[in-house]
Image (tube, rainbow, N blue to C red):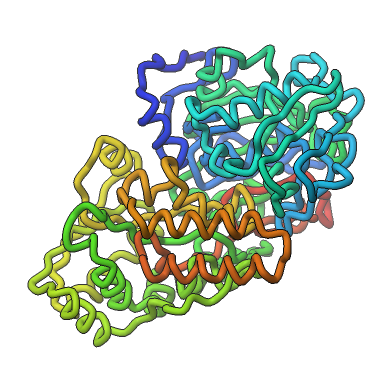
Amino acid sequence: MSKTPPGSGQSFSRRDMLRFTGMAGVAAAFSSSLAACGGPASTNATGNTVDSITAVIGYGNNQTWDPLQSASAFSVAAFLHTYESLVEGDPISRESYAGLAKELPKDVTGTSFDVVLRDGAKWHDGQPVTADDVVFTFTRVLDPTENVLVRTFFTPWLKEVTKTDDKTVTFTLNQPFPYVLERLQSVKICPKHVFEGKWADAAAGKVVGSGPYKVVEQAPLSFTSFEKFAEYNGPRPAVYKKMLWNSIVEAAPRVAKISGAKPAAQIVENIPAANAEQLQKDGRTVQFADGGNNLWLMFNTTHAPFDNKLVRQALHHAVDREKMIKVGLKGKGTAGTAFINPKLPESQPAANDLGYDPDKAKDLLKQAGVTNLSVTLSTSNTTLVADCVNVIKEGWDAIGVTTTLDSQDTKALFSKLDGGFDFQVVATTSNPQQFGNDPDLLVRYYYNTGAGVAAKYAKWAGPDQQSLLALLDEAAEETDEGKRKKTTKKVLDVLADQAVVYPLVFTQLGTAWDPKAISGVRAQGYPGINLNQAKPGTTA
């Protein structure tokens, strides 16, 4: 049964919100050429063979499939198998290797470099990949009117991308940039002949890439199926002839798919820590990885007294992060003592770690002249958030702040925010690490002018914001690694001092797989899976 996508009557601002959160669906169904009505998720299995694999993703597949707009965990993971960047990266270390490029550019330390496309690369419809496709993609990336999600990662350093010949493009930079190769990994090249003037088709689920797998069927909130792309000639050919990815948001049925003596799936991500021991007893391998996934607080800086940084700091100091990790995360997490996860090599400790100190919290409120404070904490309703927000309320109540919890569906929450909701404080989760590891990206994701939540929803503006952005730009322009690290430390100190959008805890993400069926996979610190280097298991 096919379904057609809804009309394209959304305003740009709403689309902008949806792509940033990666949580709310932009379509109830995908394009008629791909969509199908599938049976219950439990019946959707390709079998346990070398030729096929069944996976489970703990997020919906009904969100945007636009490769330049999406932050959807399901879609972004699928893009790694269906589209290609000029430069690809190891899913854990992000070490660069040539993707759609014939080879890595030889020198990216200046303000110009060329990239030559891989010979014989084709789109899933059989058409050749050309320099026109690369220019088409990056023109959209840099277009301020389109303002796609990944644009924030390329301004102000990238000026333009131009065609030299059918196989070569030239990148012209405004300034040298130290993370060029890492940043190119975040742009999936798209076919001009398919999507020019038709980006709504991509958002609604049409997938035409050059990667090792092609999407052959979509059933919203049920499954996406893939087949090997026979004409792929790149560095990571398809391991399986067929892949079936089930979309199961609820934890219990997701865990059930990888449980027991004969699991229905061979790999499942987003595994709750509470289920790890039982899955190991069932013979599964279970790994947890540190990364960028975090529960953060966001304050409305146009709503007094949250315009005062002392109040924002006080409410952070009132939260017992270690208790939150123990109770809400079952030990699988790290306190947000720095803006970047302290477990990552890119992190540096902040001058103010905003650690648990209720007496300091009370003193800061006193310094701010705030008494009898009442706060409505608006939260998303995911399991992770629900398990943690009571610790926030307990801490705030304990310092005399009357706290009301307002939990709602993530889509509803961000729809309200996009409509100008006069919130006080928001608690929710996100993970920019799916786009990259470097400090500049991890900060700009939240704080860049326009697209970042600090400006868009917290309405943070003025001299303090401009000072932070100037420091970010200074670090991005610095070619000396030691000096750049010192400037980045200043950025991290400012973020902790201002605490407009700031993490409470970083969560480890769990992945389980059947070692008899699959090997060569690893847990990763951001949602999704990467099967491009998977191998048969011990008995496959």
Q: Where is residue 121 drawn, in percent x and y?
A: 85, 25
Q: Where is residue 435 drawn, in percent x and y?
A: 61, 47
Which residue is at a point 44% across and 67% down the rendered structure image?
494
Which residue is at a point 89% across and 40% down the rendered structure image?
103
Total numbered labels placed on residues in the image = 0
From the viewer's perspective, tell me whether residue 63 is left or right of residue 282: left
Q: Where is residue 49 drawn, in percent x and y?
A: 78, 41
Q: Where is residue 165 drawn, in percent x and y?
A: 86, 20
From the viewer's perspective, tell me whether residue 223 is left or right of residue 296: right
Is residue 66 among the parts visible in the rendering?
yes
Taking the view exactly as shown, the residue that stands out farthest to the bottom is 359
From the viewer's perspective, tell me whether residue 24 is left or right of residue 397: right
Which quarter of the figure has residue 52? top right
Is residue 281 among the parts visible in the rendering?
no
Q: Nearer the viewer, residue 76 or 350?
A: 350
Which residue is at a point 64% across and 24% down the rendered structure image?
207
Which residue is at a point 47% across and 71% down the rendered structure image?
493
